[in-house]
Amino acid sequence: MAYRHARGYDEHPDCVSVACADIVEENARAFADRNGIDDANVFTDHERMLEVVNPDVVSVCTPVPTHADIVVDCTEGGETLQAIHCEKPMAATPGDSRRMKTVCDENGVQLTFNHQRRVATPSQRVADIVEAGRIGDPTRLELTTKNVFDSGTHLIDLCNLVLGDPAVEWVIGQIDYRTENVRYGHHNENEAFVRWRYRNGVDAVAATGNDADFIDCSLRVLGTGGEVELNPDGDAQICLKLGPTDPWEELDTGEPLADIPAAIVDVIEGLETDSEPALSADRALAALEISFAAYESSRRRGRVDFPLEIDDNPLLSMVENGDLTPRPVDRDDE
């Protein structure tokens, strides 16, 4: 992902990559060679990089459990730092997610997360269709993806986007975790089914896992007058149906479903206009709290009312205390 971020900065007329840090020096030098970074600005310590280079913007592209500490280090150690753009999910726990946002707010550093699908043209087109009332009033959203934490944070964020980022009222869900599934340093369930309700009365449901394809698109928005699908089965990016007897209309924007250069544009526009970026920490936290609440609902065996008032990650806690015992994966068989 660091290489993809770098490409986004390279494509922006106001940006140039000036330094990089990686705890493995060989990796840092390979990145520098690929992105035209001077050998003197290659580091194995991100705090040393901040001290020597004083960058304006930093991208954090590291495993999820390291995000919070690195973001806090950068915020407190970067004298000229104006913005941090971090990979998703935000952090391993709700407590760490809130901590990194609070520290950035207190130090006047813009914090964004790479929910690049939110700013991609196809997602924006779906949001515009819903906002314009072309499918009537939205009544339910349906999504499917690999898991509710790592990949799910993208799709849950899109649910929030198409409804105009309303507050959540409650979440209820159940998970199955019998085979170890660690991605970017963090546990993810094997399967889940989650339902949540927004305070505007709209419901959403998410099915995750390899057998969750009965929802045959990434995101479906159903309304009183029609429905719209993002990334449905087939070649079209969007399918739109305006009435029960109307044919499906296939739409293709010609733009990627996930657009990191557009995310970098959002980061820089936030700085230049002093306005909230589309990829703000507030919006990322709103999406991730639904994921954490799904795990908490499974732990409680009941509904979780918002605001979410836990600091730990329930899935991780259940693994650590033995309530969940996923079978280790034989890496040689992968």
Image: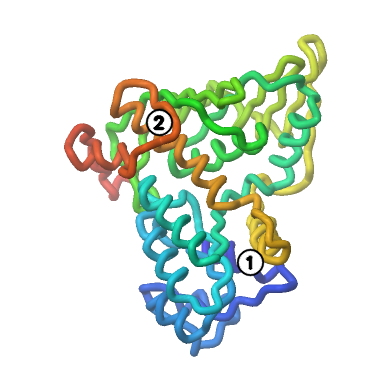
**Number of marks drawn:** 2
Up-down relation of residue 193 to residue 314 (above or below): above
**Which residue occupies 31% across, 43% down?**
312
Q: Quadrant of residue 264?
A: bottom right
Q: Amino acid at mark 2?
A: Ala
Find residue 69 and report its horizontal and vertical position in percent: 37, 63
**Which residue occupies 44% across, 64% down?**
71
Find residue 73 and report its horizontal and vertical position in percent: 40, 69
Up-down relation of residue 246 to residue 291 (above or below): above
In this rendering, position of residue 203 left or right of residue 23:
right
Q: Which mark is residue 94?
A: none
Q: Amino acid at mark 1?
A: Arg
Does residue 184 appear in the picture of this structure?
A: no
**Which residue occupies 48% across, 23% down?**
195
Up-down relation of residue 204 to residue 167 (above or below): above
Q: Element at badge 1?
A: helix
Residue behind mark 2? 294
Q: Is disc 2 surrounded by few (<14), some (14 to 19) or many (20+) residues within 10 Å?
A: many
Q: How is the image coloured?
A: rainbow
Residue behind mark 1? 7
Instruction: Work out whether residue 96 or residue 222 is closer to the camera in this orientation and state it.
Output: 96
In this rendering, position of residue 70 left or right of residue 179:
right
Residue at the outermost front position = 106
**Which residue occupies 42% across, 51% down?**
97
Q: Quadrant of residue 321?
A: top left
Up-down relation of residue 202 to residue 270 (above or below): above
Q: Is disc 1 surrounded by few (<14), some (14 to 19) or many (20+) residues within 10 Å?
A: some
Q: Element at badge 2?
A: helix
Earlier sequence position, callout 1 versus callout 2: 1
